[in-house]
Image (spheres, grey):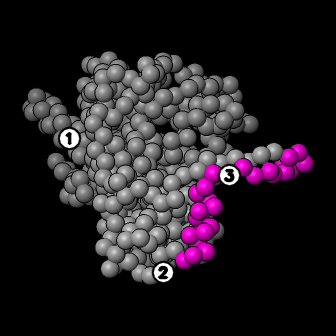
Amino acid sequence: MNNKLNVVELFAGVGGFRVGLEKADKKLFDTVWANQWEPSKKTQDAFDCYNSHFPSSENCNDDISKVPNKTFEDMNIDLLVGGFPCQDYSVARSLSKEKGIEGKKGVLFWEIKRIVEVSHPKYILLENVDRLLKSPSKQRGRDFSIMLATFRDLGYIVEWRIINAAEYGSSQRRRRIFIFAYDQSLAYAERQLDFSTGEILLKEGFFAQTFPVKEELYKNREAFVELPSDIVEISDTFSFEYHQAGIMIDGKVHTVHPEALDPQAVTLGDILQDESEVDEKFYLNENQIEKFAYLRGPKKIERTSKEGHKYIFSEGGMSPTDSLELPGRTMLTSEGTTNRSSHVVEVNGRKRFLTPIECERLNGFPDNWTATMGNRMRYFCMGNALVTQMIEKMGNTIKEIDAAETRNIAQISLNLH
């Protein structure tokens, strides 16, 4: 019996999913194909970084929409992973009516759907920004509902949860939504149906097992809904307020707002390099110190809109430097620039940016993981990356699920003989 899970990594970036899964079990998780392509860029820094750590002819640097179905049909994919962009998922009836629905061109979620349709992996693990649950602003929850209905129609049960990495052992307060879908014909799916959806969300489910939560919900936030059977109807008129966690089985949704059981944070101070290793260029000069004092200070500024009316732009103040006693704030792609969102730390009386190595540590990557590229791109890639420790934890849960699945298949085989 195959003792490996064939993994396909989409929108791979610098390999956060793969790093996390291999931390969980390098022998079990076998990445057989990966895709990373940055449109309209001559230099493919993220792909070059990925390929330098995982050199393989199966690493694809092409537009995913141009990769033919046959590539995935022949792969025997067990686990499909990817951090895909948050886009407009609206759909329409095709003109001929025969092809069903058509999603907007260039929306990468439809590439996930296409690959799942032709390969039907056992498990799917996706990551996105937490605002996905609320988009678009004029029809809250529509886009996520389209995604859930898509997986429903493909034969999957879906769990999701917004995870704040700092509540589960990371040095960064990074909130991201993770989506775990599993084939409803699996023994694991049948076992889950023995529980109520409430039990799944708070104790027995994929995320509750991986990231324990309190029994009491935050402000009693809980809701139920059944998705319309027609995805075009969802796209046109459906809206719903999703909470931080939830499950969808056969189109029936149960969503709640749980709280972390026992937050265990690593602080920003814990991941700093020794100052003797920090290059002088990362320290702020007087002009930068003055600029940061303004950027991070409170302000009220009169501005004029495009239409010509005046208004007051106001912004609250923030600490002049980031506390070394707390986890870092969410890292953005502008990290390392003179920007309000960049981290500024003060060590031995001197203020400085985080180094690229410290940014790698904030996401749980090995030191110098992104050393194949210049510093600006190193910061950019870490601002886009996921926290690999979270993937490691989820990888360990998938490992347990699949071990039980394998035992179940072996038992069925034994009974047949």
Residue highlighted by disc 1: 400
Cα separation between marks 3 and 2? 29 Å
Mark 3 and mark 2 residues within 8 Å of each other at the beta carbon: no
- Was residue 326 drawn as part of the magenta stretch in this picture? no
Where on the picture, by quarter, is residue 187?
A: top left
Q: Which residue is mark 2?
A: 281
Q: Tell me if residue 152 comes above or below residue 398 in the rendering.
A: above
Indicate the quadrant where residue 103 lies. top right
**Camera-nearest residue between 135 and 57:** 135
Classify mark 3: helix, strand or loop. Answer: strand
Residue 334 image position (x, y, % from top left) = 56, 63
Identify the amino acid type marked 2. Lys
Camera-near label (2 vs 1) is 2
| Local crowd size for mark 2, using a 10 Å CA cut-off: few (<14), some (14–19), many (≥20) | few
Label 1 secondary element: helix
Give the amino acid type for the residue marked by disc 1 in the picture. Glu
**In the picture shown, does residue 68 fall above or below 379?**
above
Quadrant hosting residue 88: top right
Sequence-first tag of 3 and 2: 2
Residue 396: horizontal and vertical position, in percent? 23, 46
Task: Report the Cα–Cα distance between label 2 and label 1.
Answer: 46 Å
Quadrant where the C terminus sits is top left
Task: Inspect the magenta stretch and tell me whether residue 287 lies in it.
Answer: yes
Q: Secondary structure at mark 2?
A: helix
Amino acid tagged 3: Lys
Question: Disc 3 or disc 1, which is closer to the eye?
Answer: 3
Q: Earlier in the sequence, mark 3 or mark 1?
A: 3
Extent of the magenta region: 285-310
What residue does disc 3 label? 299
Residue placed at 48% from the left, 64% from the top?
Answer: 344
